[in-house]
Amino acid sequence: MSKLLGFDFSVEYKSGQTNIVADALSRRDADAVAVHAMSAPSFDLLTEFRTAAVADDTRRKLRVRFEAGELGDQWQVVHGLLTFQRRLFVPATFSLLPAILATAHNDKHEGVQRTLHRLRRDFHVANARAAV
């Protein structure tokens, strides 16, 4: 979901043979349970992230600095969330950091490098290597 935050997109209906790149969500004969399982997140991390971000002092101070124009072009606010280089910013003191790290690690248990790669796709974590 965090990848989609930076995009402005629309959903278009394409019928039958014109939809040459059909996926499971556009196939009528797909098993509804399987489609639901593929498309539903296991938990709503973005909602939890928004709630925790409001209470986080580091993020709040950075947001004030961003609004004052003190931060560079790499910083943005996307849908109310502070991003750095188009990834959600996570300070070292953020309350959800352990859950974010666990999600990146528990995905496939492939070690530090792969965990860092998965983490850095969506999040900018201060001192990510040390955190992982």
Image (cartoon, grey):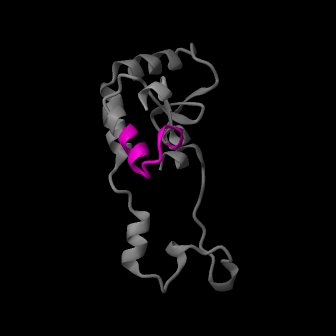
For residue 108, above or below residue 54: below
For residue 97, above or below residue 92: below
In the rendered picture of this protein, how many numbered marks are placed on residues?
0
Q: Residue furthest front?
A: 111
**Toward the viewer: 8 or 97?**
97
For residue 68, above or below residue 77: above
Indicate left or right for 96 with 27 as reference: left
Residue shown at 33% from the left, 39% from the top: 99
Indicate left or right for 25 with 10 as reference: left
Indicate left or right for 54 with 69 as reference: left
Q: Is most of the magenta stretch helix, strand or loop? A: helix
Q: Residue 104 magenta-drawn?
A: yes
Residue shown at 61% from the left, 75% from the top: 22
Give the extent of the magenta segment: 100-114
* Relative image position of residue 119 (x, y in whole percent): 49, 39
Q: Give the quarter of the image for residue 48.
A: top left
Indicate left or right for 11 with 91 as reference: right
Quadrant of the drawing holding the C terminus: top left
* Relative image position of residue 44 (x, y in whole percent): 34, 50
Residue shown at 62% from the left, 81% from the top: 15
For residue 70, above or below residue 76: above
Residue shown at 43% from the left, 67% from the top: 38
**Toward the viewer: 113 or 85?**
113
* Relative image position of residue 93 (x, y in whole percent): 35, 22
* Relative image position of residue 121 (x, y in whole percent): 55, 42
Q: Give the quarter of the image for residue 90.
A: top left
Q: Residue 112 magenta-drawn?
A: yes
